[in-house]
Amino acid sequence: MSLPDTTTPSTETARTNSFAAERETVEKLLAGRDRIEAELAKVIVGQREVIEQILLALLAGGHCLITGAPGLAKTLLVKSIAQIFHLKFQRIQFTPDLMPADITGTEILQEAAGGGRTMTFVRGPIFANMILADEINRTPPKTQAALLEAMQEHQVTAAGVRHILEEPFFVLATQNPIEMEGTYPLPEAQLDRFMFNVVMDYLPESDEVKVVTQTTAGRGAAIAPLFTGEDVLRFHELVRSVPIAEEVVRYAVQIAAASRPRQSGTPDFINEWVSWGAGTRAAQFLVLGAKGRALLQGRAHVTVEDIQALAYPTLRHRILLNYRAEAEGIRVEEVIRRLLAAAKSPTSA
């Protein structure tokens, strides 16, 4: 005996419209992928892996920490991506005397229209879609902590009043790994809020010649906006809807768990070199980033290779090496490489 069909025409129509809208969003993203690269190529030479990782964080709704020496076009790259997605951009230069109110805003006493005075909240530069926190490690922890609420809750609180930030909202922070004098290392709690730690390195000679030639020959071409903030919000929903097999999720969880010392089944090299490993948020970001990578490549499913490709930017700021590792010259990239080699890859993925 068959059960009666309880699907109403309106429900079926809603499903059809939802599927059509999702398909349209996928086609728009895939069609715009090459155009994004073409627009960025007007001002940025090389750095394809860096660009991909920042785009994946943006598609997944995550924040990025960008580590690189001065003069590698970190600010230009972030500003150009904001222009492509037509997002309001703000650059905040972090200095030792920067106060939390300089970021979030403050209340000031103003004359009211009908007479008298009233307290008015003046918004700080945090009220934008894309924030570039330049040299974030040059400001004291108190000011760094002002970003925590904004990054996690997408809101700021001033004088007990909550102010909601406009969506989409991203923080891309830069830090200089060379000159560490007068800097304040980011607390682990804040580091964990960053989806990726993207490392920008020096370009190959041929690319560097191209950069010097372009930047000394005149003004570059203007960046054309390709998307809107509403498109970005739809991309967030689309990324989360990408299917992923349970064994691939388990693989991501096992990689993160294996980085924690003194746990059952932890590899010996982790116990020897690591004082603190990655938490659950690392596995969450691994899966979200892998979904975005699959989507950008035109695939409807996530593979083990997607997880492996994003292990380095996801884990490098979440694994804290001990003194023994530093004494032996062990870098965190070597630890991640060994983690991937030791992890049992699912055969069905």
Image: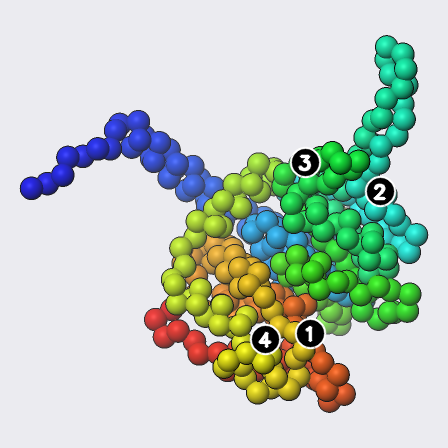
How far apart are the two marked residues, 2 and 4, measured between alpha carbons?
A: 37 Å
Which quadrant of the structure image shows residue 213? bottom right
Q: Nearer the viewer, residue 302 or 267?
A: 267
Q: Secondary structure at mark 4?
A: loop
Which quadrant of the structure image shows residue 161? top right
Residue 76 in picture, x, y percent from top left: 77, 52
Residue 180 in picture, x, y percent from top left: 86, 69
Horizontal placement of 305 versus 209: left or right? Answer: left
All told, the count of numbered labels is: 4
Amino acid type of the residue tagged 1 in the rendering: Leu
How far apart are the two marked residues, 1 and 4, measured between alpha carbons?
A: 10 Å
**Structural crowding at the residue carrying mark 3, measured as other residues with C-alpha within 10 Å and reported as few (<14), some (14–19) or many (≥20):** few
Q: Secondary structure at mark 3?
A: strand
Labelled disc at residue 101:
2
The C terminus is located in which quarter?
bottom left
- Looking at the image, is mark 2 or mark 4 earlier in the sequence? 2
Residue at 78% over, 49% down:
146
Q: Are marks 3 and 2 in contact (CB under 8 Å)?
A: no
Labelled disc at residue 260:
4
**Structural crowding at the residue carrying mark 4, measured as other residues with C-alpha within 10 Å and reported as few (<14), some (14–19) or many (≥20):** many
Residue at 74% over, 47% down:
131
Labelled disc at residue 320:
1
